[in-house]
Image: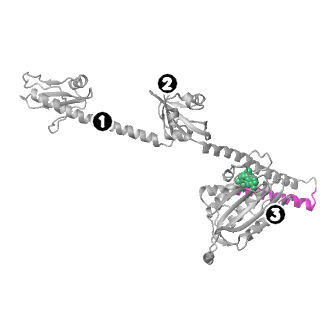
Amino acid sequence: ELLSQEAGVAPDQEPEEAVRTVVETGGLKIVPALGEAPNGRKKTSILGGIDARSAICVPLPARKRTLGALTLARTGSGETYGADDLALAEDLAGRLALAIDRARLHREVEERADAARVVAHVADGVLLVDRGGVVRLWNPAAEAITSIAPADVLGNSAVEVIPGWTDAVGTIPISTSPDPGHAEVVIPFETDGGERWISISGVNFYGGTVYAFRDLTEVHQLEALKADFIATASHELRTPLAAVYGAAQTLLRHDFALDEGGRDRFVSLIADESERLGRIVNEILLANQLDAGRLDLGREPFDSVEVVERVVEATRAFAPAEISFKISAGEELPLVAADRDKVRQVLVNLVENAIKYSPDGGKIEVGVEAHDGAVRFCVRDEGLGIPEGEEKRIFEKFFRLDPQMSRGVGGTGLGLYICNELVTRMGGRIWVEANGKKGSTFVFELPAAEPALTPQFGPESVELHGFVPPVRRAPHR
Ligand code: ADP
């Protein structure tokens, strides 16, 4: 409603009946009617709240619709609207309607473009299935997750073009409004690139159902690995615990006497097994610290050969008789610029794995050589080897090639994850290669200390929150 307002006077918020009729019918209203004499005292009821004596109300026409009405009113008595005023009002109304209509159209187009942009760029897959079961929308994320191109699904029946849709659709929770916290299901989905796990839910509306889905494959895999981890870690913890408990019980018995040698055997068994327990717990703690980014690494130049020799010495003492060791060291080796204790830990882990995964014995070779300004360590075994395609995954957290322990070899799946994290954080890299004949070769490289810089390196503090560096470890039985 357009109005030349007198100070302090405004029309009612709700339009009068007469104005509403103009909007609804598209006809106009003029008070008093053309040619009728003004009634000096009578007010029109056309603009409630305004003391109008005469008024003219014309519809705002736009594309066969009426957007509203334009009302002009005069409060002075004796003045009425005539045919000229009507023509002017209609002309004004036409222009106004055009402007309002354009503005609205513009806004609608903008909103639609925004909506389309959101659907195109959102990371979740969005799928619209109309009431007839036909796919009407398939956004780029849906394509990325499922590897199905829009051209293959759009306009087709969902049941025919989306694999497993018939089974899935019954299990997907559908709500009638996009409320927060509504249920989702996680279902497997076969794609050309292998099985993906997606979390999906739907919202019904008059035009069909909108489904939104996310790719949870990695989370799902991690969950599965975690479940395996809990099974193997509890097994790993239970075995030494049982041994410690059994030995302690035996020592406590009074009904049969143990000689000195017997007592010593049980006491050292308790010591060894407790240490093994401590190692497992430390491994879990360290992995946790690495995840949380809470680990400071020192960087002092040290002699790599000395570390290699010590590690081999320490592990050799506990290795089964069928395992033999060889150390090879290159000529003119530069010092390594890294955290000595962590390098030792990585080496211990690799050598122990080499022993663990060589159930039939064999030779373990630990080597160190200079390589392109770096120092390269390698641990070569003749054991079970790593199947092709798994070379990367074995460095993932909790990943074990044989979670069922079919060969009786247990572990937490954290060792190589920790090695990889430590080596990477010390500015190096680690990988595994096939060992020419049989078994595998684990290699890692660390930066060499520049000779000129060497004197400037002070022994930096190696601060480890709550982590006690492991001492020695009984070979896995
Ligand atoms: P775990 O505690 O299981 O030994 P790791 O992270 O040290 O965990 O190793 C991950 C997996 O990689 C092991 O479960 C094993 O399947 C495989 N693996 C590691 N080292 C070797 C090796 N030297 N030979 C064969 N397989 C190995």
- Viewer-side label of 3, 1: 3
Q: Quadrant of the N terminus?
A: top left
* Dot placed on the residue nearer the N-terminal end, 3 or 2: 2
Magenta residues (range): 257-282
The kind of residue tagged 1 is: Arg
Q: In the image shown, does 246 or 363 lie closer to the viewer?
A: 363
Residue at the spot of label 1: 104
**Magenta-drawn stretch contains 313:** no
Residue 105 visible somewhere in the drawing: yes
The residues bearing labels 3 and 2 have C-alpha atoms spaced at a distance of: 71 Å
**Callout 3: CB less than 8 Å from ligand 1:** no
User: What residue appears at the point 73 percent right and 73 percent down from the top-left corner?
Assistant: 331
The residues bearing labels 2 and 1 have C-alpha atoms spaced at a distance of: 32 Å
* Dot placed on the residue nearer the N-terminal end, 3 or 1: 1
Residue at the spot of label 3: 325
Residue at the spot of label 2: 132
The percent coordinates of residue 412 (x first, y second) are 72, 51
The kind of residue tagged 3 is: Phe
The percent coordinates of residue 102 (x first, y second) are 27, 36
